[in-house]
Amino acid sequence: MSEKVKVKNLSKVFGGNPKPALRLLAEGVSKDEILEKTGLTVGVNNVSFSVDEAETFVIMGLSGSGKSTLIRCLNLLNKPTQGEIYVDGENILEYSKDQLRQFRQQKVAMVFQHFGLLTHRTVLNNVEYGLEVRGVSKNERLEAAKKVIETVGLKGWEMKYPNELSGGMQQRVGLARALANDPDILLMDEPFSALDPLIRREMQLELLEIQSRLKKTIIFITHDVNEAFKIGDRVAVMKDAVIEQIGTPEEILENPKSEYIRNFVQDIDRSKVLQAENVMVRPTALASVNAGLKVAINEMRDNGISSVYVVDRDRRLQGIVTIDDAIKALKEKQSLKDILRQDYFTTEPETYIQDLIAKATDSKYPIAVIGEENRLLGIIVRTTVLSALV
Ligand SMILES: Nc1ncnc2c1ncn2[C@@H]1O[C@H](COP(=O)(O)OP(=O)(O)O)[C@@H](O)[C@H]1O
Ligand SMILES: [Mg+2]
């Protein structure tokens, strides 16, 4: 996958001449002490990360940790004090005025927490606004605006004004406006934080759905760990202007780097974060339908297990066989194919553990994780599912 955004050793210091603050930062002096000594506020301290194309990268942290300062550096609403920012390999800090304007109009778009809609303009006119600024012809921009309005589920609301819409719908307009320019990169600064919990969950799912179709590069900010882990392909946790840890939700959950992160993630419901593919294992034994009964029996004996999944040459799942059935069949001269059972449960790799609990409790065998063309990717033993709950 190609690297879309790369941030190297980025720092942002607010107020006056930043040099004393940078010097103290380099010496490892804390943000609080620097404020005390110099009166300068360190917004972002030496952060580095990169974001791949089509990735949803979440920056999570408590209020005041530097999230907004960081994301506003990415379209140069904040001018970084130190460091480098590359987008598609270009150093955006070296952009001329014209290049920067083009970059802001065409490559990135921002969605804000408080929607930032123009109250005297209709939904349609809000959404086409960016295109108007760019000088796109009326027909063309109306067409583009209508299309994205449909994408965000607001068809039929084009002629309403923002104050006639609920918070959730206003943020859909905010999203549509950002998408209207068809930017590669969406910067979203706590876009759902002002919404009620139910609407908020709805918007999270909507964003995931839209993203699965549009495949933008998204940098999404939140202070909510559940939201971060639901939406992010990877998550960066910020604390006191630095990035404390970067990883996939699973990595952070399984390997919190510090006490701070451990505390942050302890309230997470693991069953809502971990998916089948995160907890499945390679089966210790497998039987090939062509190799036959004796080989299947040996597989089970050697591994001390009482049943084994049976696959064809291309690892497509054919069924499961139990040791009792197999020994009986050997005596009665039946073949492996004759005694294949189908009373097992399967799941797709993306299924969340919480949705496997019922299957795990009911199942006699490990759950089979199935990919394309019914290929067996792995198995999940029931204790894994049930232990993920504690
Ligand atoms: N324009 C500014 N001038 C001075 N200090 C600022 C400015 N913007 C943010 N800060 C300070 O930078 C730090 C990080 O703020 P911010 O990035 O808004 O945090 P977050 O978005 O994580 O809540 C805070 O200490 C804040 O007071
Ligand atoms: Mg903020």
Image (tube, rainbow, N blue to C red):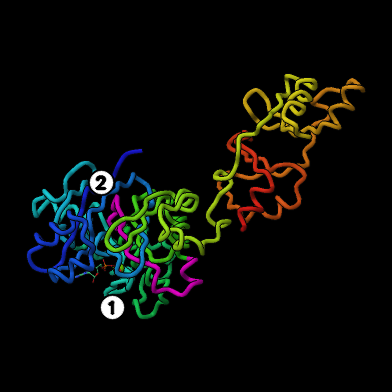
The correct choice, above or below, for 173 with respect to 283 in the image is below
| Residue sitting at x 29%, y 50% | 184
Measuring from the top left, give residue 324's x and y in whole percent. 86, 32
The quadrant where residue 340 appears: top right
Question: How far apart are the alpha carbons under marks 2 and 1?
Answer: 36 Å
As drawn, is 299 to the left or to the right of 35?
A: right
The x and y percentages for residue 298 are 76, 23
Q: Is 184 inside the magenta-drawn segment?
A: yes
Q: Indicate yes or no: mark 2 CB to ligand 1 under 8 Å.
A: no
Q: What stretch of residues is rendered in magenta?
A: 180-202
> In this rendering, which labeled residue sits more in front, label 2 or label 1?
2
Whether the magenta-drawn stretch holds residue 340 is answered as no
Q: Examine the rendered structure and indicate whether residue 12 appears above or below residue 252.
A: below
* Mark 1 crowd level (few <14, some 14–19, many ≥20, 10 Å Cα): few
| Quadrant occupied by the C terminus | bottom right
The residue where tag 1 is placed is 119
Examine the rendered structure and indicate whether residue 360 appears above or below residue 177: above
Amino acid type, residue under disc 2 in the picture? Lys
**Which residue occupies 38% across, 66% down?**
223
**Residue with the mark numbered 2:** 6
Q: Is residue 243 visible?
A: yes
Left or right position of 250 against 146 = right
Sequence-wise first label, 2 or 1: 2
Location of the N terminus (image quadrant)? top left
